[in-house]
Image: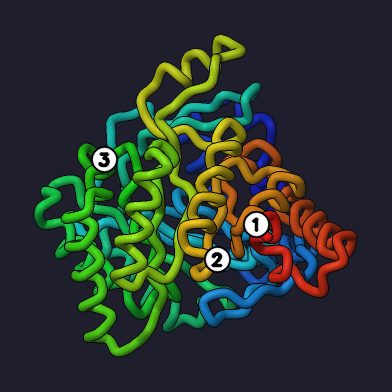
Amino acid sequence: MGAAWTLFGNPALRLIDSERAHSLSMRALKSIGESNVGQSVLNSLYKAPEVPIEVFGKLFHHPLGLAAGFDKGAEALLAWSAMGFSWCEYGGVTRFPQEGNPKPRMFRANKHRALVNRMGFNNPGASEIRKRLADRKSSNLWPNNPVAANIGRSKKVPNEHAGDDYASTIDLLWDHADMFVLNISSPNTPGLRDLQDRDYLESILKSCNSVRSKKGDEKPYLLKLSPDALDDEIRGTISIAQRLGIDGIVATNTTIKRPIPLTTQSRKAFSSEGGLSGRPLQSRSLEVINTAYDETNGKIPIVGVGGIDSKDSAWEAIISGASLLQLYSALVFNGPTIVSSIVKGLKGRVRESGFSSISEAVGYKHI
């Protein structure tokens, strides 16, 4: 078991194709992180301290969760909490099965601590994932921590019918997530970002709201924003979403912008189409968190994601207005110890700053 687990977060993984490395990591997590013994071992290695915060009416052990894209098919849900995350987000899931874009479609820029991907919502589809999650629940293999589902538009569905597409996926997965993230901002599905336009956005939110009304259950909906939108566009999107009852904001998705490459590897990665995540996204993500907090007057929770890779970047996102945090790239570059390291750092910052809880620090910069 130790050998299999060493695979995940191992520097040697950086020497092979990024998607292959990810696939090997997920295989190790499925075999180890889903067993009682494996969870116990992971927990002893990576357990994070408690820095509790209540968001969306749920108690999170601390703010840090796993971002969407790592566990696309919801295959290792128990492993994430064993590795110290207080919540996780599976997906993106689309109504219909998708192979995604042609390979290679995932690239690393080690010097920049950045990833570029053009995966294209590759997933087995909502019906298959529903079956997988129903089996998990009936086998008593459901995590105790909150689970979010990231929902995307099926590639074969035109934007004019996007509302029905999102609503159908949510309807299928309703019993298998605590909250739903509406992904209208991935750069890897043609035309998807156009869904941020007023008419499309209203149609999507109204369709999703009708599912919620039918279910009679107030599960939160979160809207995932693009870092490449102008600040005024972001404010407009949030304004429409608030009017239609959005419960939270995720800031942000990946970016199509690129830093100046520092190595041959990063030049190759940055010349590839797709969304960039990791450290270069940090400053823009922070700007969007601040903009969202201002636009909402701190009234709805914000999930900060994009370049969260240290206690400093995590703390900056919190005081800028994020109630919850997520990471992805930092797990690839730093390995699993990054989770407890960040949470310990946040616990220390709360104490040093004289706050009685981390919720007091949320948006403190705006006071």
Amino acid type for the residue under numbered disc 3: Thr
Amino acid type for the residue under numbered disc 2: Gly
* Discs 3/2, front: 2
Inter-mark Cα distance, 3 to 2: 31 Å
Q: SS at mark 1?
A: helix
Which image quadrant: the C terminus?
bottom right
Q: Which residue is mark 2?
A: 298
Q: SS at mark 2?
A: loop
* Residue 331 visible, this orientation: no
Q: SS at mark 3?
A: loop
* Discs 1/3, front: 1
Lower position in the chain sequence, tag 2 or tag 1 = 2
Left or right of 119, for residue 332: right
Left or right of 40, for residue 60: left
Q: Which residue is mark 1?
A: 366
Amino acid type for the residue under numbered disc 1: His
Q: Which residue is mark 3?
A: 189
Q: Residues within 10 Å of mark 3 (few under 14, many from 20)?
A: many
Lower position in the chain sequence, tag 1 or tag 3 = 3
The reply to whether discs 2 and 1 touch (Cβ–Cβ < 8 Å) is yes
Q: Tell me where residue 129 appears, x and y as whole percent.
A: 33, 65
For residue 275, above or below residue 309: above
Inter-mark Cα distance, 2 to 1: 9 Å
> Toward which corner of the image does residue 41 lie, by quadrant?
bottom right
